[in-house]
Amino acid sequence: MSIHVRTRINGQAQEFLCEPDQSALQVLRDTLGLTGSKEGCNSGDCGACSVLLDGTLVCACLVLGAELEGRSLATIEGIAEGGRLHPVQQKLLEHNALQCGICIPGIVVAAKALLDHDPDPDETAVRYWLAGNLCRCTGYDKIIRAVLDAAATMRASGGAP
Amino acid sequence: MNANEQGLRQIGTRPPRPDGVDKVTGRARYGADYTLPGMVWGRVLRSPHAHARILGIDASAALALPGVLAVVTAEDFLAEPKGDVASGEAEIESGDLSRNVMAREKALYHGHAVAAVAATTPRIAAAALAAIRVDYEPLPAVLDLDAAMAPDAPLLHADMFTRGVDPEPRAASNVAAITTFQRGDLDAGFAAAEVVVEGTWCSPMAHQGYIEPQACLACVGPGGEVEVWCSTQGPFMVRASVALLLGLDVADVRVIPTEIGGGFGGKTTVYLEPLAVALSRKCGRPVKMQLSREEVFRATGPASATRAWVKIGARADGTITAMDARLEYDAGAFRGSPFIPGAMSIFACYDVPNQRAVALDVVTNKPKVAAYRAPGAPQAILASECALNELAARLGIDPIELRLLNAAREGSRTIYGAAFEAIGLVECLEQARRHPHYAAALQANQGRGVAAGFWFNAGLQSSAAVHLTENGKLLLEEGSPDIGGSRAAMALIAAETLGMPYASVKPAVVDTSGIGYTDLTGGSRTTYATGYAVIEACRDLIAKLCARAALEWGVDAARVGWRDGAACHPDAPGTTLDIVALTRLAARTGGPLSGYGSVNLKQVAPAFAVDIADVEVDPETGASRVVRFTAIQDAGRAIHPDFVEGQMQGGAAQGIGWALNEEYRFDARGVLENPGFLDYRMPVASDLPMIDTVIVEVPHPGHPLGVRGVGEAPICAPMAAVTSALNQAAGTSIRVLHLTPSRVLAAIGARG
Amino acid sequence: MFLAAQRRFTGGCHEIHATVRDFRGVVAAVRGRFPEFPESELLGCSVAIDGEIVNRPWLEPIGADSEVIFVARIGAG
């Protein structure tokens, strides 16, 4: 029995039909064509599907599609605004911090969530915040440096993302 | 000589990668991100038994379900495919490949594919799997090396007779092969030794851990033409595998490599692609398949569990007189563990006249192993490097000094007969010795470990093509999937060779119908060999550009030079025609301007690495963490240093994980107990410190830019460095990985 | 010089000497001396010619004093 859901995704009104047991990740990828959020494990362990649900960082694979009713979701596709990259995205590129890139959408969303509420995290705070985002290619070194650099840049420009 | 000394302007710089914006915005499309109209979903039915004869499969109930469009079993694949598929340098036996992709006579591991279905929704596909009836005759399973090698062990393959034994055995066995490499006289060597260290080190089965599960989309047209979009390290390998297993003509198969979310060797073979093509051929619709994380762990190709016995003898002054090893590799369900490269690499760092390495390839009822970054070497080098550290301690010699004393250099012979050309092991050791990390003070409960590593690196075949657009920009086409930033390196190489700006070069990884044959991305060969092909393509283009300028100027083409991105008039200094100008003249001087490069690099470009690890142990819980890590590696010439550093850091993290966190755990029935990221614990951001890197450059003589492979050597030394460091911190001598807190605690307790 | 695994075709013989111009000549010489030696076992290996590893040898020139050692092929990750 399909459920009719009305929600907001990346600031735009969206509606869709989904099954009761379909996850938000499946809805995003298979129904709405928003394939930026990735499936790495489908059990909330890898963070590749990180999204912001009403501003809170969650794994889309752990949220039901039906739970999006009346709420607002931010995905990787909405992080860059009007073609302008978020400082986290910019710094990941400058530091050449990505290799295969599959974890990066989740890391961008997670890092943005961190800097939204903590503009001056130290290395340990960044590492523990990103502990839910697995990366197998980089050993995290350049990613952490990029996030710290993005935080510094945002502080210097008065906090505007 | 570094890049600047050789007059290189762009190579050695760190520009942003051309595919970067797509990757940070989620626009880049990986294997599971493709769809086609009319697409249906494929799923795999897997054996619930670790070892069983398959007596019959009845799919009639599944086919009767509305929405189920096709079912395939072993009958849809060739039992004895003719030929082999190139995967790296080794070739996979095609009968085994066919049976691993789809079980035939037997299911040989829990999770082994026995059938596959295509249905209009994932839900219906799952229901179809449940409706297929398979008649199994369960058999006793062997789940470790000793069980497999026991005299009356249940046999996986009745036709497996141990290779490498003379005369060939009459009785079948689970030992697929034995190999021996030897030089010199072991007895004399050990007789001359004043100190001997001996021990057995064990490393567990581990997974490459790529975050992106395998995924593909296959579409077979009514005329038999096949298209496959897939995430792979080798589109040409996929093309060959699919053609081989299904009896197709490679010319009718087009493989489009998507962006790939990690491979590390685990995507150098096929699991889903032949299934998806077979299903699509049967139902006439595009078929999408992707593995769940659980399936990735249960049914792709992990790395071998290994038992490595090592014995090293030396004189009191530190000169090593003999090195001996016996290595046993768990291959999983089919022959083909990396036992040979393990035996060849274990002592490669040392110029010791008396060396022997015996290695065994043993089958068990576990998933067939696949390559994992320098396959075979980390497990072997764990033992030899830990043994060397014990030797250093016994002799009272600094571990780096001991290695310098015996290090392989230019001209040193290896155990397999080849001699090294110019190599950088000594330089890496010297960098380690003077690195601030090595002199830094250790805190309480901390220990330091050093280890050296080596990998051969491959050459093989690559193709590249370059085309100039009407406005003088360069389109660069190559066939090497980009797993670590290689397309940026290709663009740098092209820009440097032609003398044009990096930003004017547009690299693309194209499909198998758009470029000449290219061996897979792996073996640390991409920057080396595909880069070489790019150089050749650019040189071809330069020759043509000079010929066009010659026509325009009315001079002999052989006298026209190329400098700083322009053709130079031989008789009028200062008169040049640059790329933009020549492109404007293209149509009237002969037509479109393209260049082609095609190489088969026979030479290898070996890489050496040295790691320093500091580990802290909590004596109350046995928990450990790496507090400092330095990776030093000879890259020959670092085309794009950021990506070379990235390879070093990533390989270090994998080696650290293999030592401290990761292990496949099977129950008594051969069922994997931890097929997920929660319990197969890979390092997370909070586990690791910053990983410092030092790139050494001893140019490889066989490459115009001196490039060596860099991707695999980084994983070879960390396990030994970390294990030695932990043992020093805890005052223990644990030789069984992974180093769980309970294992460490027990060792601390036993030490007294 | 032969790999351990190849010696079953040579009756245990470790190495032979022959006058050849290239690797094609090596194959012919080995099979001439040991007719039971399958060609696939020769072509399925890499070789080290005077210390330099070559993956798919065929036309590589081999000099009068050259040393040819058979080396197993290695997989890549």
Image (cartoon, grey):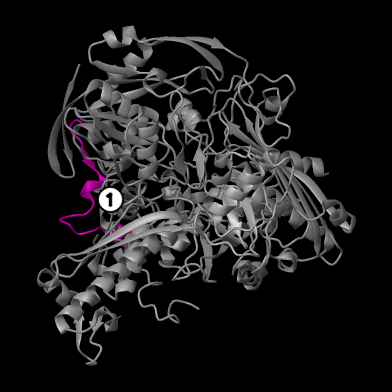
Position of B74 with respect to B454 (left or right) is left
Q: Is A70 contained in the magenta span?
A: yes
- Residues B482 and B585: in front is B585
Q: Evaluate whether residue B440 shows in this view.
A: no
Position of B192 with respect to C20 (left or right) is right
Q: Establish if A150 lies above or below B752.
A: below
Residue on which the image places disc 1: B510
- Residues B341 and B418: in front is B418
Q: Tell me where the magenta segment starts and ends, as one range.
A: A68-92
Position of B483 with respect to B20 (left or right) is right
Q: Establish if B208 lies above or below B279.
A: below
Q: Position of residue B708 (x, y in %)?
A: 50, 63
Q: Amino acid at mark 1?
A: Val
Given the image, what chain letter belongs to the residue carrying mark 1? B
Q: Position of residue B276 (x, y in %)?
A: 32, 28
Quadrant location of the C terminus of chain B in the rendered image: top right
Q: Is C77 contained in the magenta span?
A: no
- Residues B311 and B564: in front is B564
Residue at the spot 69% in from the left edge and 44% down from the top edge: C4
Q: Establish if B674 lies above or below A47.
A: above
Residue at the spot 30% in from the left edge and 68% down from the top edge: B540
Q: Identify the element where label 1 is drawn.
A: loop
Position of B617 with respect to A13 (left or right) is right
The quarter holding residue B552 reads: bottom left
Q: Position of residue A6 (x, y in %)?
A: 14, 31
